[in-house]
């Protein structure tokens, strides 16, 4: 979607979207080829530059995470110099993560004090993965209604769990406690914004988080909700027999099951390019952007949110989406848990036909599909969002 201001044009970007095709377009590949050539030329050039050094007293002031470090000096008062790479310093990514997390926490805290939300207690928590990444999570707890079930929300690519706060509060009113997790590189969690080195990280983090949720809420049914790429993450996690034993069902809105490159050669080149230049952003990928909602206010709210990434998709992220969709299409018959899949027929971001294929091929005996004529990608932010959320809650109510 394009919003114009005078002579300036601002491109509004979205989740998994058609940028995957643009990511591996001929124009984008030409740019990447030039970068790859430059990369190998640099490797071939003799490099005899001096090592960058920094004074030890500077390094001793503060270490990673604020830990103290000792300076090394000699008797004559000379300063021992060490390679700059050994000097702890806060990276740009760390600062950006801190700013995102502070904003995510601020929103939770401010929501607590809102008189309109007296029926919901909203909290946040952090947990550290085996990789050392800190993951931001939050919860919405019904205050005056008995908890009948738990729903864990997985947001889509480029967004965050806080966007589903209104939906979570509606679930609260119906007796469901809700948890949300910002997966790696998103919202208040660690990682370069919207960069996903491996979607398996997000899947493993979801499994860990689900274990924590089960421990905190014994003897109630557990459900997972996933939107777009978040739906793909939930779906792949649900293929794990251990997860299947824990959950009573999954709900998927506009799941990223059918995302394919525009030409087979791109699927061959994708792993090579993503290995050499994983964080490279392809600006051409924003040229074919799709509108994700017919509600102008919802679009403005989404793309003016600092926690929503609006830049060009990164090469590795695009490749990871292709990888997970390929895996899912090959294993749809392995799904056995109850599920509800919802999709708009006018969705140009993810393929509604792939949701139909999921419904047809899954081994689940309890499966439901709802197709909304003319609706776009962000179903819970469409003008018909109340109808969509009511259908989801009705499905959940029948299974608690």
Image: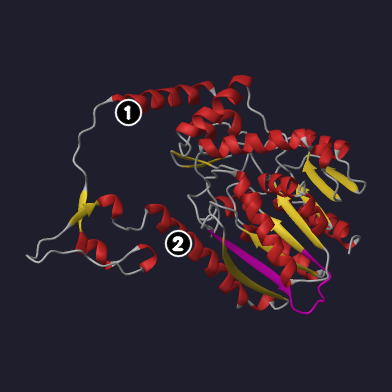
Question: Taken as a whole, is the magenta stretch helix, strand or loop?
Answer: strand
Element type at mark 2:
helix
**Do callouts 1 and 2 mark residues in contact (Cβ within 8 Å)?**
no
Q: Please, is residue 85 above or below residue 88 in the view?
A: above
Q: Which mark is residue 367?
A: none
Q: Please, is residue 337 above or below residue 179 in the view?
A: above
The x and y percentages for residue 340 are: 84, 49
Q: Quadrant of the N terminus?
A: top right
Q: Which of these two is toward me, 114 or 249?
A: 249
Q: Which of these two is toward me, 219 or 120?
A: 219
For the question of whether residue 24 can be seen, the reply is no
* Coloring applied to the structure: secondary structure
Q: Is residue 31 left or right of residue 242?
A: left
Q: Which of these two is toward me, 265 or 30?
A: 265
The residue that disc 2 covers is 98
The x and y percentages for residue 321 are: 63, 38
Residue at 67% x, 68% y: name it: 139
Residue at 65% x, 52% y: name it: 204
Query: Which image quadrant for residue 209?
Result: bottom right
Q: Which of these two is toward me, 203 or 383?
A: 203
Residue at 26% x, 26% y: name it: 45
Q: Which mark is residue 43?
A: 1
Residue at 59% x, 55% y: name it: 301
Q: Is residue 289 left or right of residue 276?
A: right
Element type at mark 1:
helix
Q: Quadrant of the C terminus?
A: bottom right
Which residues make up the magenta segment? 134-150
Q: Please, is residue 287 above or below residue 94 in the view?
A: above
For the question of whether residue 185 can be seen, the reply is yes
Q: Is residue 295 left or right of residue 353?
A: left
């Amino acid at each position: 979607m394009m919003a114009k201001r005078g002579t300036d044009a601002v491109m509004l970007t979205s989740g998994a979207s058609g940028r995957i095709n643009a990511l591996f377009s001929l124009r984008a590949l030409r740019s990447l080829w030039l970068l790859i050539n430059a990369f190998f030329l640099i490797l071939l050039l003799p490099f005899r530059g001096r090592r960058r050094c920094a004074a030890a007293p500077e390094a001793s002031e503060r270490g990673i995470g604020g830990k103290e470090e000792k300076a090394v000096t000699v008797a004559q008062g000379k300063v021992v110099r060490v390679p700059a790479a050994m000097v702890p310093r806060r990276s740009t990514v760390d600062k950006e993560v801190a700013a995102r997390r502070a904003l995510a926490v601020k929103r939770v805290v401010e929501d607590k004090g809102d008189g309109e939300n007296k029926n919901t207690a909203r909290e946040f928590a952090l947990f550290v993965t085996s990789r050392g990444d800190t993951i931001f999570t939050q919860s919405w707890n019904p205050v005056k209604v008995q908890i009948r079930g738990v729903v864990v929300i997985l947001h889509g690519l480029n967004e965050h769990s806080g966007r589903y706060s209104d939906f979570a509060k509606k679930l609260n009113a119906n007796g469901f406690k809700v948890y949300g997790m910002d997966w790696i590189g998103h919202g208040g969690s660690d990682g370069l914004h919207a960069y996903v080195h491996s979607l398996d990280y997000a899947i493993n983090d979801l499994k860990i988080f689900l274990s924590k949720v089960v421990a905190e809420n014994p003897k109630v049914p557990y459900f997972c909700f996933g939107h777009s790429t978040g739906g793909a993450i939930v779906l792949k996690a649900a293929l794990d027999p251990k997860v299947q034993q824990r959950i009573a069902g999954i709900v998927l809105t506009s799941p990223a099951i059918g995302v394919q490159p525009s030409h087979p050669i791109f699927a061959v080149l994708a792993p090579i390019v993503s290995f050499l230049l994983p964080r490279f952003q392809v600006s051409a990928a924003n040229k074919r952007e799709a509108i994700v909602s017919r509600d102008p206010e919802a679009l403005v709210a989404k793309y003016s949110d600092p926690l929503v990434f609006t830049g060009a998709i990164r090469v590795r992220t695009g490749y990871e989406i292709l990888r997970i969709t390929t895996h899912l299409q090959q294993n749809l018959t392995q799904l056995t848990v109850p599920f509800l899949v919802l999709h708009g027929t006018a969705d140009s971001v993810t393929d509604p036909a792939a949701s139909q294929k999921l419904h047809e091929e899954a081994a689940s005996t309890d499966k439901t599909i709802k197709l909304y004529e003319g609706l776009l990608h962000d179903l819970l932010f469409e003008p018909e969002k109340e109808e969509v959320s009511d259908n989801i809650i009705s499905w959940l109510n029948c299974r608690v």
